[in-house]
Image: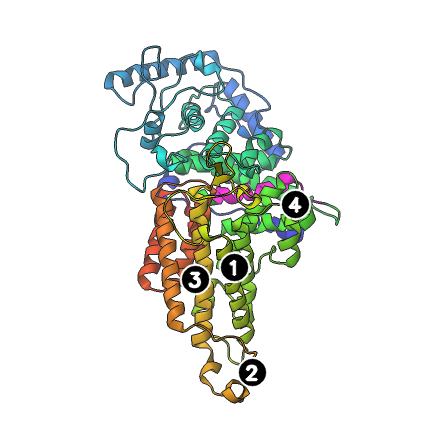
Amino acid sequence: MAPRALISAFRPITSSFSPITRRALSTTPRMAIKEDGNRTPEELEQKKQEQLKEQKEGKGRWREDLASSGESNIAADKQKVNDHDSHIKELQQEGKKKGEKGELKKKTGTKLNVAAAAREGDTPPPPSSSARRDSTLTTKSEPSETGSSLHDVPLSATSHEGDVLSPEAEKAVATIRYQYRAPQYYQPSKIQGDALDVAFLLHFVEMNQNTRNYTPEIPWLTHLPVIHSKAVKPAVKLSIRAASMAFFAKIHHDPTILVDSYRWYTVSLNAQRQSLSRLTGPDRIPDDEEILVPIILGLYEVYAGTTSDSVLHHVAAACEIIKMRGPNQVKSGMVWPMFKAMRVSDAQKALILNKPSVFSSRDWMTIPFVNMPRNAHHDLADIMLLIPGCTSLCGINGSLRTFFNSPFPPNVDLEPCRKRTKELINDLEKWAATYPYLAKPSSGLQIVEANMANLSVSGVKPAFEGSRNVILPDSFVALTIATFESVQITLTLLLHKLNTQDPKLDDPSPQSSPSTSSSMSPPPSPLPSALFSQALRSAEIILKTAGHLEGTKTVGFDFIRSVTPVVVVAILGPTKEMMENAMAMLKRWGEKRGMNGLVGAWMHL
């Protein structure tokens, strides 16, 4: 794809926020979201200088421009700070009298319940002046005494720790709650843009990465803090800021931060378009930062969902930029984990859209993995990447839903598609024989040999000290089982469609007569009833596995990827009840789990 086509993937997107977010937008002064997104860096700097001038003259509401990337700090207005601190102390004393929300930890006092405060949308009181000198707060949350619903927003990265935040994520929440307040006339000038960026980013990484680390391969997510600190291109910091703010806003139901995140999203889009415009010349190879930005912007759309298909645009842009590097240039540094992540995402997109992926060519399926580890999920992605090419042999264009709802065109030879479908089913059966522990649900821990394929799974841990076996993460096992069954149901129903809707099967001809059949002919296809029963079993397993992930409040990218198998059931469910249950689950995930953007993109299809 040419740079001009890439730029179009980053066009400004019209917001479709919920009513509560629109109310926040209408009541939040001086957000200037669209205006900032369209301004040039010189205009932004001019606006900043005007705001500084107003502050010195005592006019307007102070607001540090985070787009300056923390290059300059505003001198504190002592009187305003004193007024603010006095006001906070009064609120603190009033809160103590009313017994609201608990207190900050003192020498003989109790700890602040940050998790409970975050769930109720309140801001915890600020720390003392001495503690405020630290870049992060040291408050810790206590487990909530009140029960929580199964579908409450998750606040922990593990299923067995209830709703208690990890210590690092807890500090980030406390910092954000203290420093990022709702719009008001006076705001403390001690707020630092970099401090907020670090807090939002720390919260994002802590809540999405696995808590068990044994794998020799570091997930690309853990690179973000270093990337943020060393970023050269403005679009990198701006996109990370926007995505981490949107994630925080969705998890903690904060419409003010969600609205502000859209401001930085539009600014980062503009910066990325300018960066892509410089991708000219045959020898120009995109660097790591240019690949990372569309991935981060895609994550923003997963949580914010400004339009129904914006997630897909960013995934396509990231894959096209990776394609410009070539299959020999993705094995080193941070590009390797990003390539593998986008390969799986693009395979899922190719399955639902029923369009070939840029990674479905033989070179892209082989060269990047020469002398490099690959896990079971990437072997499964190989089969997913080949399905659109198989369905294209039928001459039907459109998404997966359109394909299965459309009759076969007349005078089209369906035998090549039938043959290819059986080959892919055979490949899937070989995969299941290679990874039997990932082909069907089972109770208990999945303890497997510590080979390179299993060690390349993020989050594995040794069975015990010195063991040659490892324990696979529950989320990875559940995701892989659901993905396997989604491929199974797709190929099974494809063969069912070929065996029941092919006009030539009901039209006797010399080619199909027994007298002309050859002993070398392929074995007969399974009966339609057997294929339908297999599809029923696959759909049941997907819904049960997805329900397990939902019930255990799994977070992170494994949960995000588990959306696609549920979408397959919503499209191809053998019964109306299964399709309705899948649609209800998707709607619930969009509303309760902060994934409106991703869910909306798939439901739109």
Question: Which of the two discs, 2 and 3, sits closer to the camera?
Answer: 2
Q: Residue at x 44, y 14 (%)?
A: 131
What's under tag 1, amino acid-wise? Lys
Taking 463 as reference, is 70 left or right?
Answer: right
Please state the horizontal and vertical placement of residue 169, each as a whole percent of the image.
44, 29
Give the residues in magenta: 285-301
Is residue 296 highlighted in magenta? yes
Q: Which residue is mark 1?
A: 430
- Mark 1 and mark 2 residues within 8 Å of each other at the beta carbon: no
**Residue 367 seen in the figure:** yes
Secondary structure that dominates the magenta span: helix
What's under tag 3, amino acid-wise? Ile
Q: Which residue is mark 2?
A: 518
* Secondary element at tag 3: helix
Asked where in the image residue 158 lies, by quadrant, the reply is top left
Please state the horizontal and vertical placement of residue 300, each as a whole percent of the image.
49, 42
* Secondary element at tag 4: loop
Q: Local crowd at mark 1 within 10 Å, few (<14), some, or many (≥20)?
A: few
Q: Which residue is mark 3?
A: 489
- Mark 2 and mark 3 residues within 8 Å of each other at the beta carbon: no
What's under tag 2, amino acid-wise? Ser
What's under tag 4, amino acid-wise? Val
Q: Local crowd at mark 2 within 10 Å, few (<14), some, or many (≥20)?
A: few
Please state the horizontal and vertical placement of residue 134, each as a whole percent of the image.
48, 16
Q: CA distance from mark 4 to mark 3?
A: 32 Å
Q: Which residue is mark 4?
A: 330
Q: Local crowd at mark 4 within 10 Å, few (<14), some, or many (≥20)?
A: many
Is residue 120 highlighted in magenta? no
Q: Residue at x 50, y 20 (%)?
A: 55
